[in-house]
Amino acid sequence: MLENILKEKNLPPFKSSEEMLDILLKEEYGYMPPKPEGITYKSIENYIPNFCAGKAISRKVEITSQFSKKEFTFPIYVTIPKKEGKHPFFICINFRDSVPDRYIPVEEIVDNGFAVLSFCYKDVTDDNNDFTNGLAGELYENGKRGASDPGKIAMWAWAAQRVMDYAETLDCLDFECSIVCGHSRLGKTALLTAATDERFKYAYSNNSGCSGAAISRGKQGERIEDICKNFPYWFCENYKKYVNNEYNMPFDQHYLVASIAPRYVYIASADEDKWADPDSEMLTCYAVSGIYEKYRKKGFVCEDRLPQVNDMFHDGCVGYHLRAGLHYFSREDWLKIIKFVKKHSCI
Ligand code: GCU
């Protein structure tokens, strides 16, 4: 059944990872901002005293990236279990700088043995059309950008990569088990982060929908027309060419996930989130499955039908679940991604 649904969409065939990523950057997200020439970190230890009943350390770190004549600083929040050993860890791109946060149940994450490093996306650059503030202000003269210059999603993804730079200075983390995660616009961002940086071994996208995990051809709910009207600044200028023109795109969102293969990808949907379109999100998992076979790995292992509430497909390198309820990064979502990582990394 899924095979027939996909056939009708006539998706562009896979190319090499480099080619697929290049098309996505040129036509959709814009090319990533350059890596900094230098980077420094300033830590405030014991940021939240007695955090997680004393089971975890809490630290605030200011990351400063240096470019030729400019520099850019943003804060992150680090929570690491005190227990001995190397900890698997999440880099979580969040809507707020609060820790814990309604989208990050930190104590439960720590009790499961994971560290979490999070930041507020707006501390990187505002979520609006203003390209003169934060990182955008450092990159663009006069706030003007060219057709393939980065949109805001690429900038938030760049920041998650700087958090990984910082993580690499710590010897208590397990780099075989690094996960970038985010919800909705930040789920789109999490996928782009992993696609452009191999240091992330897992990417977790929560309810990311249009221009994230969902196939655009024939998508229900939000379409490229809507997203380009309401949030044009998330993307590069070229993306507007594809408004109501999905079937002529030289790419679709399966290229984004395929650029992460053979690393792990997990896509989560919510049943009442019709705007994101769970069916189109799961179809992406199905569409990329074959890529993993090239690497002699299991791709997506599922029932041959569209998703149903409480489905959870964890057997292959591509994971998926459909949770009951609304558009939200819930505790249930966290527990499911944690379960998936534990299963595949044998924790
Ligand atoms: C809007 C937008 C979505 C996005 C969501 C969010 O609903 O249309 O594409 O994912 O905001 O980030 O919460």
Image (spheres, rainbow, N blue to C red):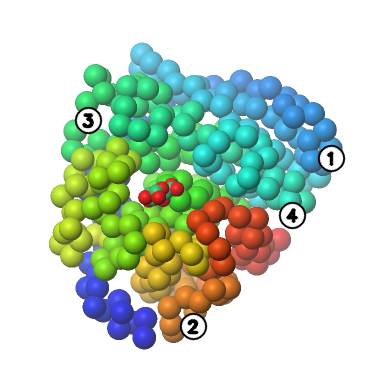
Circle number at residue 303: 2
Q: Residues within 10 Å of mark 3 (few under 14, many from 20)?
A: some
- The answer to whether 279 is drawn above or below residue 204 in the figure is below
- Give the SS element for disc 2: loop
Inspect the image, locate mark 3, and give the three-letter code of the amino acid beneath it.
Answer: Arg
- Give the SS element for disc 1: helix
Circle number at residue 250: none
User: CA gap, disc 4 to disc 3?
Assistant: 44 Å
User: CA gap, disc 4 to disc 1?
Assistant: 14 Å
User: CA gap, disc 1 to disc 2?
Assistant: 42 Å
- Location of residue 65 in the rendering, given as x and y in whole percent from the top left corner: 46, 23
Residue assigned mark 3? 145
N-terminal-most mark, 2 or 4: 4
- Give the SS element for disc 4: loop
Quarter of image, res 221: bottom left
Q: Are marks 1 and 2 in contact (CB under 8 Å)?
A: no
Identity of the residue drawn at 41% across and 23% down = 134
- Location of residue 265 in the rendering, given as x and y in whole percent from the top left corner: 49, 61
Q: Are marks 2 and 4 in contact (CB under 8 Å)?
A: no
Identity of the residue drawn at 24% across and 73% down = 9
N-terminal-most mark, 3 or 1: 1
N-terminal-most mark, 1 or 2: 1
- Location of residue 154 in the rendering, given as x and y in whole percent from the top left corner: 36, 40
N-terminal-most mark, 4 or 3: 4
Residue assigned mark 4? 112
N-terminal-most mark, 2 or 3: 3
* Quarter of the image that includes the C terminus: bottom right
